[in-house]
Image: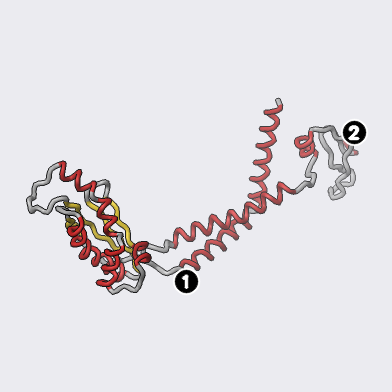
Amino acid sequence: MQNQSENLEFEIDLLHILKLLLRKSWLIILAALVCAGALLSYAVFAVAPSYEAYAMMYVNNTSSNDSSISNSDLSAAKSLLDIYVVILKSQTTLEEVIQQAGLDCSVRELSNRVSANSVNGTEIFRITAVGSNPKEAKLIVDTIVDVLPERISSIVDGSSVRIVDTADLPTSRSSPSYAKYTLVGFLLGIAITCIPIIVIDLMDTTIRSTEYLYQKYDIPILAVIPDASGSSKNTYYRPYGYETKKEQQDS
């Protein structure tokens, strides 16, 4: 019985909170729209756009010109992917890319803007570079594609890479996403409005009704103060079993 009463009280509290939020829905929506507009404005005017360009290369584990490739060659090529990525991200390779492309950035900055990963677990890997404008992004990828094969062949004997796709000039920005900023701002506005409303209500110790006393303390009610705000002088704010003066006279 005690567990059932606790569950009932929890459900009633949730219903009360839901009704409270519905009553304050105008404030919640207003705050959500304001926050969404603020983050959208921040993304448009304060966040610098960036662009991505990429190229794809095939991992070849033999320097032979034989066009036939066995399963063992493919397995060996996949195992070389991690090695090639390390070579790509090495300081010597990035320094050479910076020098040939004429970039104004450090090795660490360029390393953070360049990434490489396997395409669907195959022996083909994709090189991606981020630039502040489309031309810079394409320039970085093109320079890497030009520098990397020679670097790999000089380090790993009998291995090389072949170009599958060259980089295209990006036609749209990769970030920031205006839709994402707007959605985050909208959800943030809802959160920063709902949380204070719920906390203030939970901290409110005002006795709202006799039902509240029954559910909260489970004690008998001996008397009730008349509700002076009622429309009729003979009407009293009463708990279960109490009657108005007119009902008492009629009985």
- Disc tally is 2
Label 2, residues with CA under 10 Å away: few <14, some 14-19, many ≥20: few
Q: Residue under circle 1?
A: 45
Q: Nearer the viewer, mark 2 or mark 1?
A: 1
Per the image, label 1 sits on a secondary structure element best described as helix
**What residue lies at 25% left-to-right and 64% top-to-bottom?**
144
Q: Amino acid at mark 2?
A: Asp
Q: Nearer the viewer, residue 75 or 93?
A: 93
Question: In the visual, does 47 lie left or right of 81?
Answer: right
Q: Amino acid at mark 1?
A: Phe
Q: Is residue 158 above or below residue 42?
A: above
Q: Residue under circle 2?
A: 250
Per the image, label 2 sits on a secondary structure element best described as helix
**What residue lies at 22% left-to-right and 51% top-to-bottom?**
124
Quarter of the figure with the N terminus: top right
What percent of the width, then of the height, locates residue 225? 88, 43
Q: Is residue 155 above or below residue 226?
A: below
Q: What is the quadrant of residue 238 in the picture? A: top right
Label 1, residues with CA under 10 Å away: few <14, some 14-19, many ≥20: few
What percent of the width, then of the height, locates residue 93? 27, 64
What percent of the width, then of the height, locates residue 78? 23, 47
Q: Nearer the viewer, residue 250 or 153?
A: 153
Q: Is residue 65 above or below residue 46?
A: above
Question: In the visual, does 4 lie left or right of 139?
Answer: right
What percent of the width, then of the height, locates residue 138? 27, 67
> Upstream in the sequence, badge 2 or badge 1?
1
Question: In the visual, does 40 lie left or right of 88?
Answer: right
Label 2 and label 1: CA atoms lie apart by: 74 Å
Q: Nearer the viewer, residue 92 or 75?
A: 92
Q: What is the quadrant of residue 130 in the picture? A: bottom left
Q: Are marks 2 and 1 in contact (CB under 8 Å)?
A: no
